Amino acid sequence: MSKYTIGLDYGTNSVRALVVDVATGREIGTAEWTYAHGDAGVMLSDDPHLARQHPADYLTGAETTIRAALRRARRTRKRFKADEVIGIGVDTTGSTPIPVDADGRPLALQKRFSRKLAAMAWLWKDHTAVAEAEDITRAAATKRPQYLAKCGGTYSSEWFFAKVLHCKRTAQEVFDAAYTWVELCDWVPAALTGTEAPGELTAGVCAAGHKAMYNDAWGGYPDRRFLAAIDPALGTLRDRLPAKAHPVNTPAGRLTEAWAKRTGLPAGIPVATAAFDAHLGAVGAGIATGTMVKIMGTSCCDMMTVPLRRDLADIPGLCGIVPESVLPGCYGLEAGQSAVGDIYNWFVNYIRPGGKDGSHETLTRDASKLTPGASGLLALDWNNGNRTILVDQRLTGLLVGQTLYTTPAEIYRTLIEATAFGALTIINRFEEYGVKVRQIVNCGGIAEKNPLVMQIYADVTGRPMKISRSAQTCALGAAIAAAVVAGKRAGGHGTVRQAQKAMTGLKRKVFRPDPSARKTYKRLYPLYRRLHDAFGTPEWNGNLHDVMKELIAIRDAARRA
Amino acid sequence: MSKYTIGLDYGTNSVRALVVDVATGREIGTAEWTYAHGDAGVMLSDDPHLARQHPADYLTGAETTIRAALRRARRTRKRFKADEVIGIGVDTTGSTPIPVDADGRPLALQKRFSRKLAAMAWLWKDHTAVAEAEDITRAAATKRPQYLAKCGGTYSSEWFFAKVLHCKRTAQEVFDAAYTWVELCDWVPAALTGTEAPGELTAGVCAAGHKAMYNDAWGGYPDRRFLAAIDPALGTLRDRLPAKAHPVNTPAGRLTEAWAKRTGLPAGIPVATAAFDAHLGAVGAGIATGTMVKIMGTSCCDMMTVPLRRDLADIPGLCGIVPESVLPGCYGLEAGQSAVGDIYNWFVNYIRPGGKDGSHETLTRDASKLTPGASGLLALDWNNGNRTILVDQRLTGLLVGQTLYTTPAEIYRTLIEATAFGALTIINRFEEYGVKVRQIVNCGGIAEKNPLVMQIYADVTGRPMKISRSAQTCALGAAIAAAVVAGKRAGGHGTVRQAQKAMTGLKRKVFRPDPSARKTYKRLYPLYRRLHDAFGTPEWNGNLHDVMKELIAIRDAARRA
């Protein structure tokens, strides 16, 4: 008899449930539901930096998608029964903190706060807390530099403490009503298992470590004294945060009778401790020591893991280095690019090149016919700043090499190449610090849909680009966590590694580097790196007089060939 | 009784005749004729660098346009009679050398050469002689550096000796058949006056000085020994070139009976020594000491004059410094930008932004609504290289500051600003070497048609932008030269200065700098100059880390305002 787990994947605009066969990884039923509140699930205001979500949507979403996914599973496999589901796993966006009362119930679910934006979930991309993030960074830089060394040197306005502090400074009545604050990714498993109460709630180490400076090495969350110095209220909050945070192979609790009824699932099945989408996405794509998982969409996350027993330096420019944030027993390493698909989308949707016909399809077709280097163009991929390795949002795009004959397809291809050069810079940074990248597995929309992008990435990095078999690696990763907390005896798996072996895989198609393209990109990358360092680092000192000339020389060589 | 002169303006695709009242400058008749041979007057081959013209077109063009312009003049002024025309002036493109026989007759007019491309006029934009230009530059750099100091440090493939030498190396039979070579601008007046024979032909100092290294200071054309060392055949040619070259107030001869019959003009009226279009265009726009004339079209020529009695340094980066090439008694100084309108045209015609509606009109309208600096963008105007002050064709465009929200109108405006920054760099270069720019007069298509460009130029340079009253300054300049060679007694003028006073003027509309825009551009220009020097000069050494940040700061300030 087959056994199944469910992965629940909370995205920015919708939630998805995926029913997975734990023996094979086959996905037999899935359903997606767009959040009901706000603009496609995101509540906005006059302030363009504000982005909130209504916690009620998380509950409605779980019920709706699990029921629908089970129905579809029955359609795929006639013999499938809901009581063959042995566990649930969850991944979410983050940092998405929610103010809750002393019972762990979101304030937004109380009538008096039901329309108050500050009482909602503060979505990951809410940037209202810029000033607070700067205060925290400044405090940590002088008093606790070790905290910053694990998160790229800067505490972000997207993260937990910055948002909490901004609420205190701008919506005192909400802040005062909140007993504590809980990450969305901790709150969902708690709600499903009736463990929301602050003493009972299981915190995930992924959110705590990457967004709230949690680390067992210094006793968990930042110490009380440090937080209280920033604001006494943060000191009080510190006392109410969990003492310990856990990896995804830890059960958060068991599905309540009430939730069993709402979903049609068996009561009492375990729900795994949750993690962020990129982290469980990496698990679903088969991350392991030496395997980099690239989650390629509007932006890109580059995930790696390193066994805890190995010495690991603080790699400068990484967004986060957190023990067990991806795999138990390993450091989870997160790097990334602030914009990838978003840059291609900008060119198509904002510049709208090529007259009537400037779609991604047309530009991709025309760009595919071009020889590497033949345009004479080079770009920096910084239209939305640079996450890794510069950790600097105040950077912008650059295009060089235009003539009076430069075409849209040439620019489009150059933008793809720029993101690939950015990806190579990240790979190099890992390897410079001893983290060898032996295999690259891609997943996400762009990896699925755009072979030109994958081929250019292979040619630029000189490495084969593999594609995850699943198109839903985040939900699949959550289902893997579920199979592990269900345990071998229940028909699940003993370890995440074993679950990955059974449940993940690669597509047959591999994009391999073309030697001649590779040769050209080897000439272009040093020029990219020169511009990168000249515009992106205060240390660089030099001259760029040969950049345009070298681009012309590369162009002439490519056109002759 | 009114008196008139005719200006004949030979352009790249067509020739124009203009009938002008010498007392007022009023243009009472004009006609244009597109050359019959080749593609809109330009004969092409498989080699994209080749561009030739058929000399027969120059003769047919003179006859056709003069006759038509006289007809139109009669329609404008009933009392007008062709025998009130007292002189003819000529301007042409250049360097456009023509191989001629011992009678000064173009080889192309002989049957055996009538289809031979090497026997045609070698149009200014013919770039087949790159290798020969390099040979000449190398020879001059070591043996006669003073020659190069007057022409920007590099002898161009567009110029006289490079083209002649390329003919010798690639079309020996044409070269052998040619007794000598004559610039188009010398040949037209000679043809009209029957003075083509090498001993009789009057050479203009504009073409000789700017394109053939002629200078009275070293005895005219480059010395025989220097030329013979490059190729003995150039030494032989040297003996057949005129001993002396002349400014435009020198008569080249008198209209022959034959040409009087062909055109309907009185025989015996003087024809002035010719000059290039930009140089006589400057005269027609009212150039004087302290007045810069900008001829703004696909590219831009920046012309100035300095009295010969003043000390004048060799200004680095200028295309040419030639005594009397514009006004008698003054140095003619030529600077310029390789592309201006061509950059805007590239964006509209090649990138075709904005979906269906990316015309110059729409982009201009949208760009007019933008606040200076608010886009956060900055560009270099080098899509076609940089003529002044870097004299480097191997430079390309650059755009920096793009975000995920950058629009086509923002880029369009930024490209206009880039050309204005390039213009300011030229103004500054003149003034750094003691040539004060007290007034700027614009003419040409862009000055006529695009008020946004003129306003941005005013705001960027901090100087009022004035527009020449005539839309045909080149032909008007030629008509002014004609009025001077006709002389006061015949009803013309005693000097070019007097003729300009009577015949040129400005439009009433002046574009004045807006103080607030000026302030922003004063912050932007140093950034432009940093990029200019970093990418354009081997001497620069430094860092560009603050460029993007400063652009963001300027953007934020502009958006707040």
Image (spheres, coloured by chain):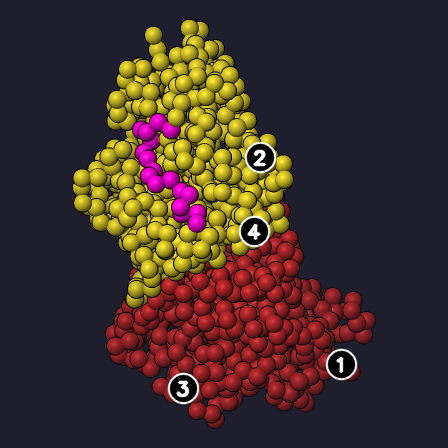
Chain colours: A red, B yellow
Where residue B338 is drawn, which disc sits there? none
Kind of residue at disc 4: Gln
Identity of the residue furthest to the bottom in this view: A309
Residue at x 42%, y 64% (from the top left corner): A547
Residue at x 66%, y 79% (from the top left corner): A504
The answer as to whether the residues below labels 2 and 1 share one chain is no
The answer as to whether the residues below labels 3 and 1 share one chain is yes
Residue A179 coordinates in the image, percent (x, y): 38, 70
The answer as to whether the residues below labels 1 and 4 share one chain is no
Kind of residue at disc 2: Leu
Where residue A313 is drawn, which disc sits there? 3
Q: Chain of mark 3?
A: A
Where residue B109 is drawn, which disc sits there? 2
- Describe residue A280's horizontal placement relative to residue B382 as left or right: right
Mark 3 or 4: the one toward you: 4
- A550 over B8 or under it: above or below: below
Identify the magenta region. B236-252
Disc 2 is placed on an element classified as helix
Judging by the rendered image, the residue that carries numbered circle 4 is B172
Kind of residue at disc 3: Ala
CA separation in Å, label 3 and label 2: 81 Å
